Image: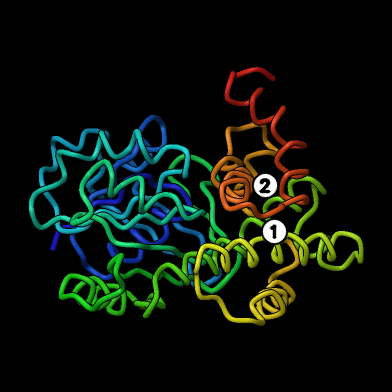
Amino acid sequence: MRIAVFGVGGVGGYFGGRLAQAGEQVIFIARGEHLHTMQREGLRVESIKGDFTIFPIRATDNPEEIGPVDFILCGVKAWQVPAAAQVLRPLLDARTCVIPLQNGVDAPIQLAELLGIEHVLGGLCQISAYKARPGLIRHVGIEPKILFAELDSLPSQRVAILRAAFERAGVLVDTPEDIWAALWRKFLFIVAISGVGAVARAPIGIIRSLPETRQMLVQAMQEVAELAERMQIKLEPDIVSKTMASIDAMAAGVVPSMQRDILEGRPSELEAQSGAVVRMGSQAGIATPLHSFIYASLLPQEMRARAGNP
């Protein structure tokens, strides 16, 4: 079985690295100094679950060198998905499927429209990890878990094969009975901590402990829960309190990737997270006042980052 990891950031680097560590045939697709460092020194992962290095490593910036694979873990940022779909075409044949691991709920639909629905699974993950420097992934919080399923949530042989690979790698894995509900549970969680954290410019331990920002977290999740109900996504009635309990259990220093990108002046997933809530809310006739505030507040900086201005 051949697995390509397209985008070797915190998500792709960690989960692809664990598969490679377990002996799977993994090819990493990266670029720039990150790629060159991996080719020279391997991929290092510093993790609260145990450090490891993948060396020698097969890594390239040219998918045409690889040819068709069985699975593609798509670990690029959400705003990079449409462009990535075009670049990864040489990795596809009739059997190949792509597992998008972006935050948000748009990526499976985007990939299905561009590559064909038969090539796409629904996917998400739970982890706090990032590229610390070229060749180094740092996993700092959250028990790593990966979830995926067919877009219709029916069992399939390819889902079973990939699940077995992650189990051999010692990674927590689940194939949900309702992949869209799973995607929206993650969406409800991540847009709340990312948006509120980015506006407050504070880690999770602070924003959950101050009554004012804690209430913002709750309201952000309530807006997404109401939107999900309007869109006939089946979330639990107590999803907000359950998610708040998970937030309370997180390491105090966790900073979501969108918030980290915004704080460091890089392009972020603002459009795929807060922006998506505002867009879908407008389409569904659901008011999203807090997400509208968050999106509008962060948009000027996002525009500067995308224009390359300081």
Place residue 145 in its image quadrant. bottom left
Instruction: Give the total number of marks visible in the rendering.
Output: 2
> Which label lies toward us, 2 or 1?
1
Residue occupying image coordinates x 34% and y 39%: 30
Specify few, some or many for label 1: CA neighbours under 10 Å numbering under 14, 14-19, or 20 or more: many
Badge 1 amino acid: Ile
Q: Quadrant of the C terminus?
A: top right
Q: In the figure, 289 relative to 169: above or below?
A: above
Q: How many other residues sit within 10 Å of disc 2, few (<14), some (14-19) or many (≥20)?
A: many
Q: Secondary structure at mark 1?
A: helix
Q: Which residue is mark 2?
A: 259
- Between the C-alphas of marks 2 and 1, the distance is 9 Å
Vertical relation: 233 (above or below) 119: below
Q: Earlier in the sequence, mark 2 or mark 1?
A: 1
Place of residue 172 in the rendered image (x, y in percent of width and height, measured from the top left):
41, 78
Q: Is residue 121 left or right of residue 230?
A: left
Q: Nearer the viewer, residue 110 or 298?
A: 110
Q: Residue at x 69, y 58 (%)?
A: 192
**Residue 122: % across, % down:** 35, 62
Pointer 2 and pointer 1: residues touching (CB < 8 Å)?
A: yes
Residue type for callout 2? Gln
Residue extending farthest right:
211
Q: On the rendered structure, is 177 left or right of 202?
A: left
Question: Against 186, is 304 above or below?
Answer: above
As rendered, which of 307 and 129 lies closer to the eye? 307
Q: Position of residue 99 (x, y in %)?
A: 31, 58
Residue linked to disc 1: 193
Q: Residue at x 25, y 76 (%)?
A: 154
Of 180 and 9, nearer the camera is: 180
Tell me the tag on residue 138.
none
